[in-house]
Image (tube, rainbow, N blue to C red):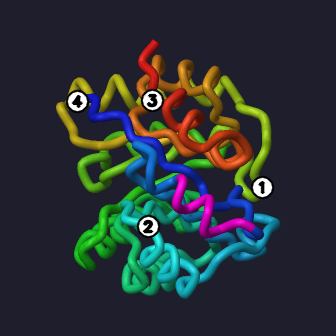
Amino acid sequence: MKQELVISPSVLSLDYGNVSEQLNMLNATRAKWMHFDVMDGHFVPNLTFGPDILKGFKKAVDMFMDVHLMITDPKKYAPIFIKAGADLVTFHLEAVKDVEECVELCKEIRALGAKAGVSVKPKTPVESLLPYLNEMDLVLIMSVEPGFGGQSFMEDQLEKVRTLRKYIDEHNLQVRIEIDGGINQNTAKLAKKAGCDTLVAGSYVFKNNIHEAVESLLCEE
């Protein structure tokens, strides 16, 4: 069942010389989630935020904290980020041994009171997750190679979205389909048509008029 459309602006693209003003503007939009990218410099070639920064954002905005762990050891760090305020923890299928370990970590995340998400990189098929979707709250399709903001949208990743949408609808599951990478007004339309109900956008939101950018992503036309 397709759920209400949610916009999750990625703070990776915030203007860190102008944080308070941008967060105040974001608070005034219809974006309900905040996407918080955690990179360890190992799983992906970049370093970003730790749990203390998440605590700061949690105080600054009244939003659902959508935490994306692009790290080598999600099992160790998922509880730490949940304690810091994560409402949803998404980790990578590529960061665990196999699908069975993936499912176990989803169960652990849920047991700690957060929602559990699983992400796949562009070269990773999504089919292995299908039988286990009832153990997940969200699947995140990367439409760029994870690690850096501002990359171009990979349209071929929408086939994974269509595969997920078909399976979720046929089995009447309450699982969100999120997409991250190169999302703007035009690519958002493609993603929504394919079946996404959760859109991550960084550069497009924070490097433009924040209110107008969020509204354009919510537009159904």
Q: CA distance from mark 3 to mark 4?
A: 18 Å
Counting from the top left corner in percent of width and height, residue 58 is at 43, 75
Residue 146 coordinates in the image, percent (x, y): 71, 53
Residue at x-position 79% and y-position 68%: 46
Q: Is residue 144 visible?
A: no
Three-letter amino acid code at disc 1?
A: Phe
Q: Nearer the viewer, mark 3 or mark 1?
A: 3
Badge 4, how many Cα within 10 Å: few under 14, some, many 20+? some
Q: Is residue 131 magenta?
A: no
Q: In this picture, which residue range is highlighted in magenta? A: 18-25
Name the N-terminal-most of marks 4 and 1. Answer: 4
Residue situated in front as seen by the camera: 7 or 39: 7
Instruction: Tell me if residue 120 comes above or below residue 147 in the rendering.
Output: above
Tag 3's secondary structure? helix
Tag 3 near tag 4, CB within 8 Å: no
**Amino acid type at mark 3:** Leu
